[in-house]
Amino acid sequence: MRKPFVAGNWKMHGSKAMIAELLTGLTAGWKQADSVDVAVCPPAIYIDYVRRTLGSAPIAVGAQNMSDQPAYGAFTGEISAPMLKEFDCRYVILGHSERRALYGEDDDFIARKVEVALDAKLTPILCVGETLEEREAGITERVIERQLQAVIDRVGGEAFGDIVIAYEPVWAIGTGKTATPEQAQAVHAFIRERIAMLSADAAERMIIQYGGSVKPNNAEALFSQPDIDGGLIGGASLKAEDFLAICNAAAKVKG
Ligand code: PEP
């Protein structure tokens, strides 16, 4: 039985005042930690502040990105996996479509980061997903397969038991358009089957989140699908009430 996992991707949003208010709401309202894992992923500069503000609240912290270099060195502007670990990060989002599209991160570069994260005992939240053109061209599965294969080539299938995958159709991110539960389920099942070809155990344990305009009013229907194990939440993770409603929806249908 997989424990559902909901994570908030704050992207480049936040200030100390806004974060204090948001975390006050989340820590006061989050009561179902036994049935759902929850994490927030702030901009890197706020990670320490968030960790300290959360105190012993059952909410983990993740980073939104990480260097592909394993340790320390002359890599101006980068943050390494050991640095994230030192500040108590449990997760790191890798391969988000914004990093793929806006910062030119390709499949192999992302796969290298996944390997570095795993070596450092950080759990990667590996984002995969197709653009609207790719969906319309009928090549969704081919695109996802390619994105997965780069990681498989580097870390093998067994490692996927320790990787969270976020299926995020690019056309649904920040657009208010959501994949229907059936559309999302079909891709999630494809991903699980692909990993099952390499390791049935890893496929069974692997958490696959859906991301792309998840809101309080669609979360329950999405999370009701058998292969949707939670969500990676952008916009709605910035309002305590909305994020809590989404986490509670996961507890209701999966907890
Ligand atoms: C995201 O960027 O990871 C995301 C899912 O965003 P939104 O929920 O705003 O579509």
Image (spheres, grey):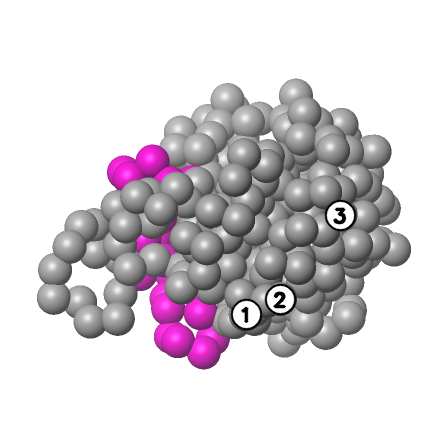
Query: In the displayed structure, does residue 147 sit left or right of residue 30?
Result: left
Q: What amino acid is found at the position of numbered circle 3 in the picture?
A: Leu
Q: Position of residue 102 (x, y in %)?
A: 45, 78
Quadrant in the rendering for residue 168: bottom right
Residue marked by disc 2: 18
* Rendered image: mark on residue 244: 3
* Rendered image: mark on residue 15: 1
What is the span of residues highlighted in magenta in the rendered image? 99-124
Vertical comparison of 63 with 178: above or below: above
Determine the residue positioned at 84% across, 44% down. 220
Give 205 or 146, whichever is nearer the viewer: 205
Disc 2 element: helix
Ligand 1 lies under 8 Å from the Cβ of mark 1: no
Q: Are marks 1 and 2 in contact (CB under 8 Å)?
A: yes
Which quadrant holds the C terminus? Answer: top right
Vertical comparison of 57 with 149: above or below: above
Q: Main secondary structure of the magenta part?
A: helix
Q: Nearer the viewer, mark 3 or mark 2?
A: 2
Determine the residue positioned at 21% across, 56% down. 69
